[in-house]
Amino acid sequence: MRRTSEKTEARSSILSQILQPEAADRLGRIRLVKESRANDIEDRLIWLARSGQLKSKVTEEQLKELLGTVAENDKREGNNGATIVMNRRKGTWDDDDDLLDY
């Protein structure tokens, strides 16, 4: 348990150093809606910071661009968890059958 809280504190510390307050607020709101997406974004931001690819603090606009990129990648890979599949039962009477008569 102690190790988990230390990791969480370390992540928070890194994120506070690399995010402007507006970007941190947006990331917090994203966490409220979809925690897995927020964790993915945080992981990417921390990786960018550790690899030296961030030259300054991340703005809200830059965070929006990153979110858009992640959303595009998820769509391309088919990882969109919001897909709904409806299977209709065949062979039962349905109101749509009336349309076939015309």
Image: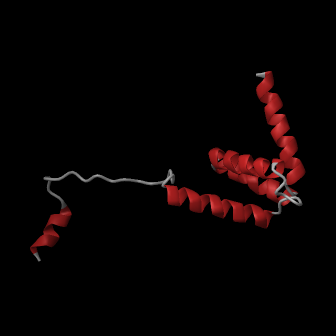
Which x, y percent locates residue 42? 74, 48
**x 52%, y 59%: residue:** 75
Along the line of sight, the residue nearer the viewer: 23 or 58: 58
Q: How many marks?
A: 0
Which x, y percent locates residue 58? 83, 59
From the viewer's perspective, tell me whether residue 25 is left or right of residue 94.
Answer: right
From the viewer's perspective, tell me whether residue 98 is left or right of residue 22.
Answer: left
Q: Which residue lies furthest to the front in this view?
A: 51
Q: Residue furthest bottom?
A: 102
From the viewer's perspective, tell me whether residue 32 is left or right of residue 99.
Answer: right
Position of 80 relative to 95 (above/below)? above
From the viewer's perspective, tell me whether residue 78 is left or right of residue 49.
Answer: left
**x 88%, y 60%: residue:** 55
Which x, y percent locates residue 69? 64, 62
Quadrant in the picture for the C terminus:
bottom left
Along the line of sight, the residue nearer the viewer: 36 or 26: 36
**x 51%, y 52%: residue:** 79
**x 13%, y 53%: residue:** 91
Which x, y percent locates residue 49? 83, 51
